[in-house]
Each structure stands twice: as C-alpha cells, then as structure tokens.
C-alpha cells in the first residue's frame, strides 16, 4: 500500500485507502502481496485478488462465479487462461500463480467503491448455494410473492407460510402491479430457501430483509412506505449499485414484461420509490452510466434537461424482449399498465396505419390483433367497430385548441337539465353558460365506468335525472313516509283531486290551464299545484331516480322510478302516485352533502341540478361500496391524438398532464385526483385509457416538444422503409428512387424531412409514379426548401452540370435592361416541372 501510495508516476487512487480499511474488517485472509496485487483467501480457501494500482477498483475471482456476479449487479469481464501463451497464460502473471487461479479461468470485477466490497465477498462465499436461491433473482422473489398470494387467498403452501405466524415488522415491495404490493420478508425468504426459522430483519447479511435489499428490492413498512437503510449495517449495499438494481427491478424488467418498446425513468420517481432524499446527482449518474446499460442490456439512453435534476427523465430503448418471469398464480398476474405512446417520423411513413393497429391492439389484445396487422380491410373494419362502441376516439390537435375544448369548459345553453327546482319548469328565454365536457373527459369517464363484457360493477344510469321527493313532514307524518317506502311507491298531495292521467297533461300549459279552469283562475305559473304536478306527472320519467328527503340536509331512501303516473281515487291522502324500485333505504339516513352540495328546497318534488350530482358518491350510498375506481373487468379504451405537436400542450392539458403518468392513474400507488375548474368535480385518469399520438417531424422536431409531454410518453420512430416498395413498377425501381431522394434530402436538409414510403405504396403503373412525383413529392420538396429550386433540383438529380434533366428543366434569365450584369451574383435560372419525366436513373 505504501509503495503504491508513494508512486509519483501514478495519479492518486481516491478509493484505495477506503477499500483497504474495508478489507481489514472483512472475513478474508491475507496470503501474499506484490506491488500490483494483494492475494487473499476466504474461509473455504477461495482465491480473491485485489489490484492495488490505480484506480484500485479491480478484483479477481474464479470464473465459476460468473452467473452469481451478474445476479448481484456486477459486470464480470473474463480473464481466461491461454495455454499457448506460457507462463502467464496471456494475462497478468499474478493471476496464474499457485496461490491464485493457476490455469483456471478467472473474472475481473470492477467495483464502484468501498460500498461494494461486502457484497462482492458475500457473493463469492455463497456461490455454492446459488442454485438454492442464496443469491436471489427477481424471478425467484416475485414467484415467492405469487405463492404467498395463493396462501392468503386459497390456503396454498400453508406448510411453508403457515409456520411464520402473523407478519409483524419487515416488509418488501413487489416490482409488479399487484393489489397489495407489500409482502412480509421472512415468509418469502423462508419459502425460497426452504427454511422455517430465520430472522426477518437486516442485522445480518443472511437475514430476510438484508437478502431482499441486496437483491435490489425496496424494504417498506406495512403501508408500503420505504424504510431508511440503517447506516450501521455495512453489509447492505448502497449508493449507485443499489440505485441500478432498483431501477432494473422496478422499471426496466416490468416494462419488458409488458412488451414495451421503450421505458422512461424519472429521477424524482425513482428517488420517491426508494425513499431517497437529495440524491438526484447520484441517481442521474447511475442511470446515465455504462454500468447500468450493461446491467439492463440497453443502449445509451436519451435524457432531458436539466441534468442532474429531480425532473430529469432517462428513456431507454428495449431492443431485446426476454420472456416474462414465471407466474405461478395467474389470478394475481399484474394487469397491463396504461400506454402513453407517440409515433413520430417524416410524412408518409405509415403513422396513420400504425396508429390504427396500435389502437386495435390495445383494445383487443396482442394475439387477436396480430392476425389483422397485414390485412388492411379487416383492421379497418375492427377499428370502426371499436370506434362505434366508443372505445376509440380520434381528434387532431391544432394551434387554437384549448383546455376548454379538450377537457371541459363553459358553453351557452338554452336547455334546462342543469336547472334546479320547480320555479323554472315552465322554461324561459335566453341562455345560460353550461359546463360542457371535452373529448378527453368523456372518454376518461367512459373508460372508468366500463363494466366489461360481464357487466361486473353495479352502476347507476348517469344519463337519467334525479328528483328530490318529500313523502311527508318529518316527525309529523312519519307514517306516510313509511307507507311509501314499504309499498314501493311515491305519492304527492299537490294537484288535489284532479286525475292528471290524460295524455294531454304531458304538457305544462295543459296542466296550467286545467288548474286555472277548475280550481284557481288567478293562479300563476309558480303555483305549487302546477309546478309540482308537472314535475311529478310529466317531467319525471320511468328510469329516473328519486331521493326521499329527510329534512333539508338528509336523505333516507334512493330508488328508480318503475311506473307511470296514476291516480288513486280511494287514497285517504296524496292520491297522485308512482311505483318505485328502492335501491337503498335507511332509518338513520345519510347526509345530503355526500352527493349534492345544495340544501334541499321545501318543495315536495323537483328535479335536482344534474351538473352538481356526485354520481360516484350516490353509487356508494346505493351499493355500499366505492365505485369511483375503474373496475378490474373494465375494457381498454384508446384516445388517438393526431398531430399532437401542433397544439400548445401546456394550454390543452393544463394540470391533467400529471395525471397521465402510470403511477398517478386511478388506483395506482400515487393516485392523483384534481378538482376541475368549471364543474368543480374531482377527476382522475383511469388505467384502462391509453393515449396514442402521432407527430410529423417535418413540422417540428421531437427535440422541441414540450418537456412535460416528453417525459410522460414513450416514443417510437417510424422512418421511410424503401424495402416495402417494388423494384419494378412500370420499369421504375421505386426502392432506388426513394432511397436516392432521401439520401440527398438528408445531406441538404436533415433526416426529419425525408419522403415516406407511403407516398408510393399505391403506385401500380408508371403513370401512378409520375402522378405522385408531380403532385406530391415535388410540391413537398419546394415547401421544404422554401422555393429554393436549385436545392429541389439537386435532390431530384437535375440542374446545371447534369447530363440529363429528369424532373425539372431550367433556362437562363437575362438581366433587365439598365442593370449591369456585374451587379448580379451568378446566373439566374427559371425552373419548370417537365411535361415528361425521365426515370432513366432509376430503371428497374
């Protein structure tokens, strides 16, 4: 150590002394030393070498530990023995000595610092038990969680889990989306190791929580809140090594299981998941480093600015899609997460067709959609069917689109659905501002309320109206209230002894005239005998709902109107009646404010303001359960946003941009609901709503896209694919034509403005190709190059110096009289599109 520290030809090794201090307290036996290497053995005579020279981060172990090292998050580099290169075998001489590996192959393990030493030694000492799960993999741990779910739900594996009793202290978070993500540590490790007695904590490296922590799982309390790692336990991994393992387990591998093409990790989200504070520089360095790329088997990621920051987002392309870990209990398999996907690329690259297929795939599943991908007619038919069912919605963003159109806003209305009370029943003139739902809110609610094919969750019909009805005065006419509830009817005393059954009384004016004719010639349109009779007799319809009031601020029953109005001449009171189907009733009643903000009026019957009704709360009152979350049976819905880059994203989405994140959706771990500004109702985005957008990069580069949108969406690039085109259409090689044009565009402009293959896919003759070139490609090139026809000509292979003119022809322009030629920079040309194109450069 002293020799290496004093070597002036080397720059300092900042970790050397700290690693030496670690090794002095580690269970290793010093054997031998040379200037560059220190030789150690473990208790079982296992060789263990440390390279002392700078950077002092290289360790060497036997090659039999390869898989164990990978599982533990290290990146082993082989150092094989080559018998053709004696005496060292083609490697450092120390590695081939008797006290090290002799002629056996070995590995170089690069650690990040002293925090990795205990983990490294632990892996070596336990490798013999690797097959039994001592070095734990994500698959083993998640399989144990599946087994524990079966134990809780069905009593399976009781011989393994039953001996541990009721869980108490240490819990671990599953890396999959489960109904309950927190699991007790001791039963899981006991199940994996086949043990019935062990410690569930992390005081020793063999304890349950310690094993799970070192496998890259997050230790939590029973409510799934991360627990801080005890500083005194040096056998627990920390720092960048643990960040990488947790990112792999909780982000990369779950995305692979869902066959995602990309996955994004926001530094703040990973920090929150792990319970880290002020660790964003370390997180960003770990996520952006080569070690994580090797561990996760991903190429270098893209990242947003600023970096490092809690808002920095790293996006990884998942090229390889390994098979999902085995799930032993299919009833507990995680449901697919919401997809936020943007397809981007130059015009004509098939984004529209790909979008249709993605939407259909998300709705009906991968297997069923695979049969439709290459059949445009069947795919189109399925797309239209789903759109007609309301499961796919399509809209195009534009510069003037606003939050009020996309989510909700106020619009003029002359309707009376949102009026409250009987005074307005007769209608009136003018208009009022009514809250109008936009397409995003409509499809979100449609997805949230979907009951699936079987219609599982109980729901009220939200298109129906709700009426408040008083069956009698509280504490004075209680027997009248009970009579209605016991006999499934509602009754009204207003209107006296007139039978209002005749069809003509469907109209307010007929009731008004009848009352004035038979009862009170001076009655106004606000008379309770008129307005209450109209509400009860004509406005209320079969299928509407009724809440029975218990004073101004409580209700004691909720029911559905089951029959038309009828007159009971033998009734001792309230002869005007309707049959009811009571959905809920209670002697104690419940607060009106749970579902309706306004206090009830004294009128016996009137229609409530439909825009103020909280249907989720009314359903909870009716069915006794919270139905606000999207049910497990709910089918998938897709909102397609074409040209998503053309609108002001911040203006259109507003505060809802946060709700698009998977972990902020309804029912997710970090569920977020917001109060909408116009309706004042709570709103969240359900997990079964997927958003697929398209973006034309010729209009706007992806680099200029709103940062908030970029970190919440996956991006899939669609570029021109000449291979889908024919090499002989009327003697023209379309592949060569498109490839040549695009190479020249990329040279003169950029890759984002290439010509898509879709422009030519419908060409079946030479005339078709000429038509596309004349009316689509050449005008598009002129737009790209701002009418700089010299560049358009260069793309098309025309212009001065060319042997032939293929698509454009030019003629020189003489300067106007009076203007010396010296004042003109270069020759001026007039460009024209040729009458007949020459495709000789692209002959089949």
Image (cartoon, rainbow, N blue to C red):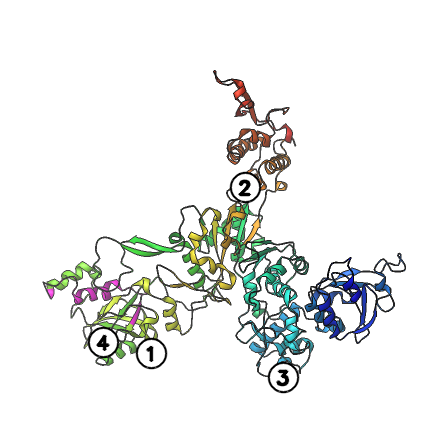
- Total numbered labels placed on residues in the image: 4
Circle 1 SS class: strand
Given contact means CB atoms under 8 Å apart, are the residues at marks 3 and 2 in contact?
no
Residue 69: give x, y in percent of width and height: 73, 66
Dot 4 and dot 1 residues touching (CB under 8 Å)? no
Residue 645 visible in rendering: yes
The residue pinned by badge 2 equals 348
Q: Distance between the residues labelled 3 and 2?
A: 64 Å
User: Of callouts 3 and 1, which one flags the residue occurring earlier in the amino acid sequence?
Assistant: 3
Whether the residues at callouts 2 and 4 have beta carbons within 8 Å, the answer is no
Cβ atoms under marks 3 and 4 closer than 8 Å: no
Cα separation, mark 3 vs mark 4, equals 61 Å
Mark linked to residue 472 = 4
Q: Are marks 3 and 1 in contact (CB under 8 Å)?
A: no
Residue 530 in magenta stretch: yes
Where 714 sits versus 242, above or below?
above
Judging from the image, what secondary structure is the residue with disc 3 in? helix
**Which SS class for mark 2?**
loop
* Residue 252 locus on image (x, y percent): 61, 61
Q: Earlier in the sequence, mark 3 or mark 2?
A: 3
For discs 3 and 4, the disc positioned in front in the rendered view: 3
Circle number at residue 163? 3
Q: Could you give the CA–CA distance between mark 4 and mark 1, rounded to whole angstroms?
A: 16 Å
Which segment did they paint magenta?
Answer: 518-547
Which residue in the protein does label 1 denote? Answer: 586
Q: Is 243 inside the magenta-drawn segment?
A: no
Eyeballing the image, is 392 above or below 146?
A: above
């Amino acid at each position: 150590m002293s020799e290496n520290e004093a070597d002036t030809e080397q720059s300092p090794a900042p970790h050397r002394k700290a690693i030496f201090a670690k090794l002095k307290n580690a269970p290793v036996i010093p054997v031998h030393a040379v200037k560059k290497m220190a030789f150690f053995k473990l208790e079982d005579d296992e060789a263990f070498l440390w390279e002392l020279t700078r950077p002092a981060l290289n360790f060497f172990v036997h090659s039999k530990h390869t898989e164990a090292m990978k599982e533990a998050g290290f990146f082993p580099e082989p150092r094989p023995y080559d018998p053709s290169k004696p005496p060292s075998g083609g490697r450092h001489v120390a590695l081939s000595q008797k006290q090290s590996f002799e002629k056996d192959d070995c590995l170089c393990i690069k650690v990040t610092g002293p925090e990795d030493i205990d983990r490294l030694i632990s892996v070596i000492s336990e490798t013999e038990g690797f097959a039994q799960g001592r070095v734990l993999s994500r698959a083993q741990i998640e399989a144990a969680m599946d087994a524990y779910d079966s134990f809780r739900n069905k009593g399976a594996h009781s011989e393994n889990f039953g001996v541990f009793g009721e869980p108490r202290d240490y819990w671990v978070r599953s890396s999959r989306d489960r109904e309950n993500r927190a699991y007790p540590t001791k039963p899981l490790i006991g199940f994996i190791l086949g043990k019935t007695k062990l410690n569930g904590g992390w005081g020793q490296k063999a304890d349950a929580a310690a094993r799970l922590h070192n496998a890259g799982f997050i230790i939590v309390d029973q409510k799934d809140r991360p627990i801080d790692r005890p500083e005194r336990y040096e056998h627990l991994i920390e720092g960048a090594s643990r960040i990488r393992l947790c990112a792999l387990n909780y982000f990369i591998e779950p995305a692979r299981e869902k066959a995602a093409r990309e996955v994004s990790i926001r530094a703040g989200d990973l920090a929150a998941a792990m319970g880290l504070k002020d660790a964003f520089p370390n997180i960003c360095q770990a996520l952006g480093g080569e070690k994580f790329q090797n561990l996760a088997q991903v190429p270098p990621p893209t990242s947003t600015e600023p970096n490092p920051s809690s808002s920095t987002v790293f996006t990884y392309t998942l090229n390889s899609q390994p098979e999902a870990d085995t799930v032993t209990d299919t009833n507990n398999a995680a449901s697919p997460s919401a997809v936020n996907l943007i397809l981007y690329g130059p015009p004509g690259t098939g984004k529209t067709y790909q979008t249709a297929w993605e939407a259909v795939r998300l709705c009906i599943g991968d297997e069923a959609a695979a049969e439709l991908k290459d059949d445009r007619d069947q795919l189109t038919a399925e797309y239209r069917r789903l759109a007609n069912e309301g499961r796919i919605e399509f809209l195009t963003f534009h510069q003037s689109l606003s939050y009020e159109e996309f989510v909700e806003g106020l619009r003029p209305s002359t309707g009376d659905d949102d009026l409250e009370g009987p005074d307005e029943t007769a209608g009136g003139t003018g208009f009022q501002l009514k809250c109008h739902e936009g397409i995003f809110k409509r499809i979100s609610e449609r997805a949230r309320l979907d009951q699936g094919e079987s219609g599982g969750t109980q729901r009220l019909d939200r298109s129906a109206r709700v009426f408040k009805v008083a069956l009698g005065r509280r504490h004075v006419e209680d027997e009248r209230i009970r009579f209605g509830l016991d006999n499934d009817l509602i009754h009204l005393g207003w209107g006296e002894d007139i039978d209002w059954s005749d069809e003509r009384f469907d109209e307010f004016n007929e009731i008004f005239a009848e009352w004035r004719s038979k009862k009170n010639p001076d009655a106004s349109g606000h008379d309770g005998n008129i307005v209450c009779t109209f509400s009860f007799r004509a406005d209320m319809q079969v299928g509407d709902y009724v809440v029975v009031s218990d004073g101004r601020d409580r209700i004691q029953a909720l029911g559905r109107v089951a029959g038309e109005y009828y007159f009971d001449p033998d009734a001792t009171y309230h002869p005007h009646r309707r049959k009811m189907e009571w959905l809920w009733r209670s002697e104690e009643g419940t607060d009106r404010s749970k579902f309706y903000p306004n206090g009830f009026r004294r009128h016996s019957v009137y229609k409530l303001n439909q825009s103020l009704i909280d249907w989720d709360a009314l359903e909870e009152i009716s069915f006794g359960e919270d139905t606000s979350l999207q049910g497990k049976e709910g089918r998938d819905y897709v909102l397609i946003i074409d040209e998503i880059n053309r609108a002001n994203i911040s203006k259109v989405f507003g505060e809802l941009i946060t709700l698009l994140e998977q972990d902020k959706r309804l029912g997710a771990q970090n569920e977020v609901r917001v109060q909408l500004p116009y309706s004042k109702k709570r709103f969240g985005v359900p997990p079964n709503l997927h958003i697929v957008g398209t973006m034309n990069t010729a209009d706007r580069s992806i680099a200029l896209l709103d940062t908030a949108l970029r970190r919440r969406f996956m991006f899939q690039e669609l570029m021109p694919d000449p291979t889908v085109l024919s090499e002989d259409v009327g003697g023209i090689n379309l592949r060569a034509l498109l490839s040549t044009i695009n190479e020249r565009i990329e040279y003169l402009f950029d890759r984002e403005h290439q010509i898509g293959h879709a422009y030519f896919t419908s060409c079946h003759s030479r005339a078709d190709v000429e038509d596309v070139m004349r009316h689509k490609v050449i005008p598009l090139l002129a737009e790209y190059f701002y009418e700089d026809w010299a560049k358009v000509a260069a793309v098309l292979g025309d212009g001065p110096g060319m042997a032939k003119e293929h698509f454009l022809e030019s003629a020189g322009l003489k300067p106007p009289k009076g203007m010396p030629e010296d004042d003109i920079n270069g020759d001026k040309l007039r460009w024209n599109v040729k009458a007949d194109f020459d495709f000789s450069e692209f002959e089949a």
